[in-house]
Amino acid sequence: MNHFKRNYLLITTISIIIFCLFNTPIFSQQNSQATISGNVKDSSGNSVEYATVYIKETLQGTQTDSKGNYKLTVKSGTHTFCVQMMGYETYEQAITLLPNESKNISITLNETRYALQEVVIEAKSAVQRINESPFNAVAIDASIEHNSTANISGMLNKVSGIKIRETGGVGSDLNVMMDGFSGKHVKIFIDGVPQDGASQSLGINNVPTNYAERVEIYKGVVPVEFGTDAIGGVINIVTKKDYNKKWNLDASYSYGSFNTHKSYFNFGHTLDNGLTYEINAFQNYSDNNYYIDTPVKEFLPDGGSSTNKNKIERVKRFHDTFHNESIVGKIGVVNKSWADRLILALNYNQYYKEIQTGVRQDIVFGGKYRDGYSIAPSLEYQKRNIFIKGLNATVTINYNNNIVHNVDTATYEFNWRGEKRPYSSGGAGEQSYTHLKSLHHNWSNTLSLKYRFKNIHSIALNNIFSTYKRSNKSLLTPGSDYDPIPKETTKNISGLSYQVMPNEKWNASVFGKYYSQYVAGPVAKSDALDHFIRSTKSINASGYGVAGTYFILNGLQAKLSYEKVYRLPTNNEMFGDEDLETGDIAIKPENSDNINFNISIDKTIDKHSMYLEGGLIYRDIKDYIQRNITGLSGGKYGAAYINHGKVLTKGYTVTARYNFSNKLSIGGNFTNINIRDNVATQITGAPSNTYKARMPNAPYMFANGDASFYQHNLGAKGNTLTVSYDNFFVKQFPLYSEALGSSGKSYVPTQLSHNVSLSYSMNDGKYNISIECQNLTDEKLYDNFSLQKAGRAFYAKVRVSL
């Protein structure tokens, strides 16, 4: 653990040096200064927190506190006083200040409403925070989707460069593909806290949009504030935190095809003394009994079987029920002199998942399932201007106790018609005879410090320390104990950044990251897998990066960012999942050189607004970790992880959107990602047959489009009718390497799907009803290894928001 101590000392020393370099005295201007103070509220009378208050000519500014109050010291004279906040119209007022004058200006901001679209967000909280980010980042306003039955993954699927890949219906396994990276390359956060090791109930395909206020996406180059080893990017779900309202209630229920039920409930209350509490609860249930098209195994009288792969039957999935339930309770205090937020939370999750198929669709199960539950307490502390003005601190402590059961004890084998017969050998287990209980213990502690000084400089320090421990126990043998050698990891990631923001034309950031991981677990010493020893290894690496943005013209912005980044192996990649996947404790971390270049134009003329963005993507990956399908005995299949070597990714994205007033929004995006095998020679020295070939089972060309029409005050004032349409396109892509000749000529076909929805909101959004049709034309949709997804489906939802 000495490397952790060295890491802390190094980061602390650098922070003190930079602090001393830039914290020089400001020349005294007291004789010519004046003070402005006041309060900022919205049209409902609620305080507006984190609004930017500034002088337009000099860009000198500050922020409102948790009660909407601000205080700003400026030179005397005539100025343009401005207040700006995302989601509100910018406020401007001409003011004249005399020397030593104190002026009070309290204002009300008017809200603005936009259709679902990508908007540039920024890593700092300062003037023009949305447009000045040097990172390739977008944010989605989740409230636009609160009346739909969509979950978080459904929202993400509309973002350029992102493809959500699912193995089936509700609760199925999911991979996020972001600019060519997928799976473990993309890290998920909730309110800035990493979700490594979290329960399946908190997967982004199970969390409803109502749970989030917005979703932030950082592609390729990730700011140090997230303290992660994400080589592909970060998705941060930001939950609702409106503690300025006395109380709020949001409840919804939806029902649809395949006996799908979804519900959500949220109630929060903040007292005058700052005490606050909140309850969040949501659940999903589905039989997932949709039809698929597949060859069917025939059971022969002699005990054998045969499958005619040319004979395709339409059959219904019969063993794919999923349900999950989550409840989150929070209690704490806000708006105190010693804490802006101090929140204690307790999260309970449980789920049950029947497993219908293996890693390929020609494998069918009829009795295999997985279930589990987790208890996760957490503590969050936030304080702005702690110790000194401009220094903000956030500390989080999270523990997750996750219990999972993998059960495979069926004594029958099944085919796709649901027919079954006893195993001829008299054995049991469709994949492998298993009834395993796994205990997962996760600790995660986060420290984030950000210091802003002289209005143009800021330093950020972030450190995430996490531990993981997994122990297994077979329940097949009464009295058996947990594995004598647990599977353990300890990970520490630190980051330090400096950002300069001299004016509204440009800003830049430089940063460094330090990665450290300690791994311990069992390694077999015999082919019979009957003797294990404890093996350990340590990983240490350093990364760095730079990002900048420049406004060429008003509304015309260019961004360029680079990062040398590492991704440490995940627990499943090193230890497997105790079911369909096997791990390798010796697997090496990936590293990549990531480059993003983006140029965008954002113009508004009268009631017309247009946004157009183009982006170039470059990723040069070494020790790429690849998930491969492996053959097992008895014609069964599993998955294993290997370091493939080198992979080179080049691509581009295009995004366009047009809005007319608050009545019409039309937009879409297109992504072309060229992911190629970059290993020229094999270990033996022989040329690689797959050199320059496209990486298999990875979509490389996809697009989506959407259009929404809004009719306001329909039926009564404050009522709105919304009619929406969206589509998704994926070009065919190879299932196996194209370089393998005829044996590899298998493709996931080109797909185009359409969705429509109608929503009616009453009394300014307090009461809502919506209906949806997904996959309107009943297209055959496929994903990982040609696993077929659901056909046409209908859903309805009612929601109350008070």
Image (cartoon, rainbow, N blue to C red):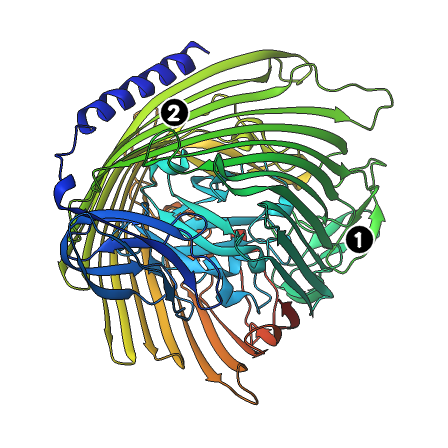
**Percent position of residue 139, x then y:** 39, 56
Q: Which residue is mark 1?
A: 300
Residue at 33% across / 64% down in the picture? 670
Q: How many numbered circles does the render carry?
A: 2
Tell whether label 1 touches label 2 (CB within 8 Å). no
In this rendered view, identify the residue nearer to me: 52 or 417.
52
Q: Is residue 588 above or below residue 652?
A: above
Residue at 53% across / 43% down in the picture? 334
In this rendered view, identify the residue nearer to me: 588 or 525.
588
Q: CA distance from mark 2 to mark 1?
A: 57 Å
Q: Which residue is mark 2?
A: 515
Whether residue 249 is visible, yes or no, is yes
The C terminus, quarter of image: bottom right
Where residue 494 sits, quadrant-wise, is top left
Amino acid type, residue under disc 1 in the picture: Leu
Front disc: 2 or 1 = 2
Whether residue 738 is visible, yes or no, is no
Indicate left or right for 397 with 706 as reference: right
**Percent position of residue 606, x then y:** 25, 80
Marking on residue 195: none
Indicate left or right for 351 with 689 as reference: right
Where residue 426 sits, quadrant-wise, is top right
Q: Are there few (<14), some (14-19), or many (20+) residues within 10 Å of tag 2?
A: many
Q: Are there few (<14), some (14-19), or many (20+) residues within 10 Å of tag 1?
A: few
Residue at 48% across / 84% down in the picture? 712
Residue at 31% across / 45% down in the picture? 124
Local SS, label 2? strand
Local SS, label 1? loop
